[in-house]
Amino acid sequence: MRIAAAAITLLFTLGVFDQLKTPALPMPARAAASVEEIADRLHEYLDDDVTYAPYVTLPSTPFLAWCWPERIETRMPPEGVPAYSGRLLLPELDEPLEVRFWITSPEAAIRAVATARRGTAECGRSGDDVLKDVTGFNQWGWRGVQALVTTDAWTEHGDPGAQATIVAARRGLLAEVTWAWPFEMDGEPDPQVLLQGTASATSVLAAVGGAPARSAPAPATRSASAAMAAALPPASCLRIRQGHGVVAGPRERARLA
């Protein structure tokens, strides 16, 4: 039985669903229309610990960055489009969420999700990583894939850990949300943490994507995408909001000039 299905069955049996905490982020009526608006919606939950700042995953990092096979270059996110990357601390989770968003065309977003889905087949091939589960994701208008991996030596003391990632698209919005947590040696990842993390990640997607009854923004033409790409600052000029949220968008270049 797949681990996600097994976890849900176990939680129903034990009544653990009653112990899950309601995610903190609200769902606005409309989708965010720019990376600046994404940053504003997530600003309250940015990690304030400056020691984490160097570890924020940049928008240009391949999908499923924790999975590092030989052909990782096949999992590159869209280039030359507005993007946001940050680390969030939510009250219902003990570990931070790594979030990345891109605003691109619906076609490019779908291709990116397919790329990530294919990439999961390459994970778990090393001696340290084990791919435990890959499932579809379909919540609040976001559709994509969710992967769960366990790894040895997750902490500096050699303790194992689990890591889950959702890659999903909502029209022209593309997202990757990742969270990790430790577990006991010779044990299994806590299914409650998996489901709590999934609920929290879903709330972040809903906070950016808005109500599913309303359409999400999408640059529909190549000329629009090319114009945005031309307006992006170089990688060396990416601004870090409070040291933890990387924003790359047309307006950011004007602010940096």
Image (tube, rainbow, N blue to C red):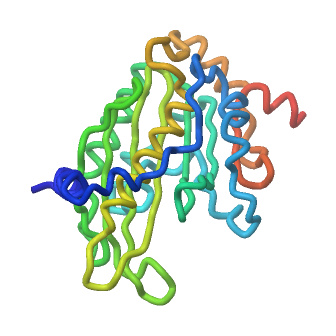
- As drawn, 48 above or below 158: above
Question: What is the x, y in percent for residue 67?
Answer: 37, 61
Identify which residue is drawn at 30% across, 35% down.
114
Q: Position of residue 26 (x, y in %)?
A: 59, 33
User: Which quadrant would the C terminus be assigned to in this image?
Assistant: top right
Q: Quadrant of residue 83?
A: top right
Asked if residue 113 is positioned above or below residue 181 in the image, the reply reads above
Q: Residue at x 63, y 39 (%)?
A: 84
Q: Residue at x 24, y 45 (%)?
A: 135
Q: Position of residue 86 (x, y in %)?
A: 64, 49
Q: Is residue 237 left or right of residue 107?
A: right
Q: Is residue 118 positioned above or below 140 on the image?
A: below
Please determine whether, in this image, residue 215 is positioned above or below residue 4: above
Which of these two is toward me, 186 or 221?
186
Quarter of the picture holding the N terminus: bottom left
User: What percent of the width, then of the height, locates residue 71?
Assistant: 33, 55
Residue at x 33%, y 61% (from the top left corner): 70
